[in-house]
Image (cartoon, rainbow, N blue to C red):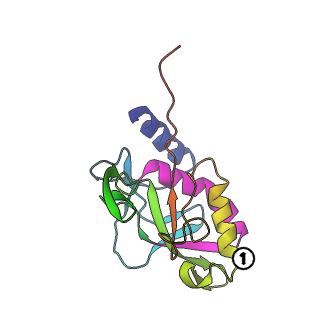
């Protein structure tokens, strides 16, 4: 995981993404993106104040997906949570499994801002707007992300937001 983090930081540097080192328990490669912008897509908090720590792999995955989101007219992803030390819930009960938020690889997106200034709230607009399901398909079709949890596939737990999780690509150093 250390090597994966080093590769990620090198790649962010090659893409000229400005970042600073961050600090967070359980996050493999914690960083802060001071501008909260990745390849022209703003990351806007809905209520918390930064700085926002995230794993390098989430930043890189969002950076790489930004052109596809911009093609849909997206200018900003409005989120409530990135890093938050919490556990996965199943059937309303907390498990002993760390959430992807706890390791800085997840983000909860409640709203999407478009280039024309409109803000689409997932809870109110998912069924009525073509853009939000298209955004969902962009994340679902990317190898950089796990299947997003959304009103489309988890209406009970994610009726008001998209939960996205970046993958951390690990290369084995062992030979067979």
**Image side of residue 143 versus residue 155, left or right:** right
Q: Residue at x 62, y 78 (%)?
A: 126
Camera-side residue: 111 or 41? 111
Q: Name the image quarter holding residue 71.
A: bottom right
Image coordinates of residue 73 in percent, x first then y, are 69, 74
Image coordinates of residue 20 in percent, x first then y, are 38, 54
Camera-side residue: 17 or 45? 45
Residue highlighted by disc 1: 130
Write the start and end of the magenta stretch as one range.
55-79
Camera-side residue: 46 or 147? 147
**Image side of residue 34 versus residue 14, left or right:** left
- Furthest toward the top, the residue is 176
Q: Name the image quarter holding residue 66.
A: bottom right
Camera-side residue: 156 or 4? 156
Q: Residue at x 62, y 47 (%)?
A: 143
Q: Name the image quarter holding residue 128.
A: bottom right
Q: Residue at x 49, y 37 (%)?
A: 7
82 drawn magenta: no
- Furthest toward the front, the residue is 91
Neighbor class of circle 1 (other Cα within 10 Å; few <14, some 14-19, many 20+) is few
Image coordinates of residue 152 in percent, x first then y, are 62, 69
Image coordinates of residue 169 in percent, x first then y, are 52, 39
- Whether 95 is drawn above or below 161: the answer is above
**Image side of residue 167 versus residue 6, left or right:** right
Local secondary structure at mark 1: loop
């Amino acid at each position: 995981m250390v090597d994966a983090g080093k590769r990620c930081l090198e790649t962010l540097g090659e893409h000229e993404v400005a970042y600073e080192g961050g600090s967070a328990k359980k996050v493999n490669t914690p960083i802060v993106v001071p501008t909260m912008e990745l390849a022209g897509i703003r990351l806007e908090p809905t209520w918390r104040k930064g700085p926002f720590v995230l794993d390098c792999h989430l930043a890189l995955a969002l950076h790489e997906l930004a052109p596809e989101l911009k093609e849909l007219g997206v200018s900003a992803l409005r989120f409530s949570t990135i890093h938050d030390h919490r556990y996965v819930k199943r059937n309303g009960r907390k498990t002993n499994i760390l959430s992807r938020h706890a390791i800085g690889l997840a983000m909860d997106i409640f709203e999407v801002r478009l280039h024309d200034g409109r803000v689409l709230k997932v809870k109110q607009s998912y069924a009525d707007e073509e853009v939000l399901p298209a955004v969902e398909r962009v994340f679902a079709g990317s190898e950089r992300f796990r299947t997003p949890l959304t009103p489309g596939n988890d209406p009970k737990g994610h009726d008001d937001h998209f939960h996205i999780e970046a993958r951390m690509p690990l290369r084995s150093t062992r030979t067979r």
